[in-house]
Image (cartoon, rainbow, N blue to C red):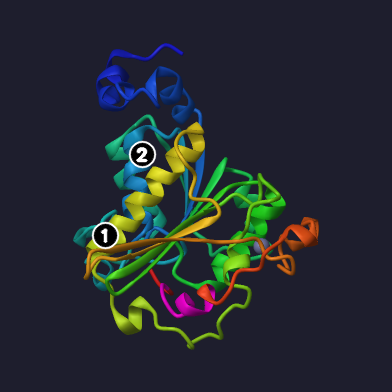
Amino acid sequence: MDFTTTQLQRYSRQLLLREVGGQGQARLLASRVVLVGAGGLGSPAALYLAAAGVGRLVIVDDDRVELSNLQRQILHDTDRLGVEKAQSAAQTLRALNPDTEVVPVLSRLSADTVQAVLAQGDLILDGSDNFATRYVLNEACWQAGKPLISAAVLGFEGQLSTFRHGVDRASPCYRCLYPEMPAAGSTPTCRSAGVLGAVAGVLGAWQAAEAIKELLGIGDSLAGSLLLLNLLHGQIMRIRVDKRADCPVCGECVNQSAVQPMGGVADVIHTRGAGA
Ligand SMILES: [Zn+2]
């Protein structure tokens, strides 16, 4: 691919990276990412993906910008209170990089609509703030054969993983990690318990880095593991996530004898990370 002079300058710092180079940059410009949620996680993720020159960003969000969002949702600003977040995001991202086509989707994902939305992306980035959407996305990615980069934040803590069950049938899914959806109201959320904006920034930026790695096929995927971060105490932990033979989403195709169901780790962390 021939880059314009402007593109050579714009992407010069990542063209220099051996893992990216001209081929990788061309691939990014031809890539499509569906980003669910233009909030605390989606804001930094979308900004870095657009800045990196991802060719198409589909931004799914049905909310409008509120004053209480601006402490962390850095795609939006004070002049845009009341504006649809997906539209506000598109305005910010188009101004950042005209190479990136931004497609706002102003509706909430449901089991009925999710496949049509996922068809518009090579990779799905989950920055949603509720378990219902995460479960819908996880199952839809299995059906659509798409990788899923998932994160959640609460307080000073965050968690992050890549789920490749859609493209690698031996790889665990979100539901292998969290088999049962918590009852509504049973776990704390950012609305009820608070979150530091910078924590959402770290996790959202990290999602963008993992998305770029998956798109380019570079580095070590987080698939099969979960990162747990506590920024208040400067702690980070990476734990293994195994595929569950009895997983209702991805378990059927598994050789039962080859599976080692994970112990209680999922239970320990189940109450964390309900919101963005
Ligand atoms: Zn599973």
Q: Nearer the viewer, residue 150 or 102?
A: 150
Residue 33 colored in magenta in the image? no
Q: Magenta span has 269?
A: yes
The amino acid at mark 1 is Arg
Q: Secondary structure at mark 1?
A: helix
Q: Quadrant of ligand 1?
A: bottom right
Relative image position of residue 268 (x, y in whole percent): 47, 79
Q: Position of residue 143 (x, y in %)?
A: 71, 53
User: Residue 52 sits in which quadrant?
Assistant: top left
Say which residue appears at 25% left-offset and 73% top-offset.
68
Give the magenta part as a residue range. Answer: 266-273
How many marks overall? 2
Depth check: give the residue in front, 107 or 159.
Answer: 159
Q: Is residue 259 above or below residue 7?
A: below
Q: Which residue is mark 2?
A: 50
What amino acid is found at the position of numbered circle 2 in the picture? Answer: Ala
Image position of 83 with respect to 144: above or below:
below
Q: In the rendered view, does 150 fall on the left or right side of 88?
A: right
Q: Outermost residue toward the bottom?
A: 186
Could you say whether the residue bearing mark 2 is in a helix, strand or loop?
helix
Which residue is found at the position 43% from the left and 45% from the top?
A: 210
Q: Which residue is mark 1?
A: 80
232 in relation to 252, above or below: below
- Whether residue 220 is situated above or below residue 204 in the rendered picture: above
10 Å crowding of disc 1: few (<14), some (14-19), many (20+): some
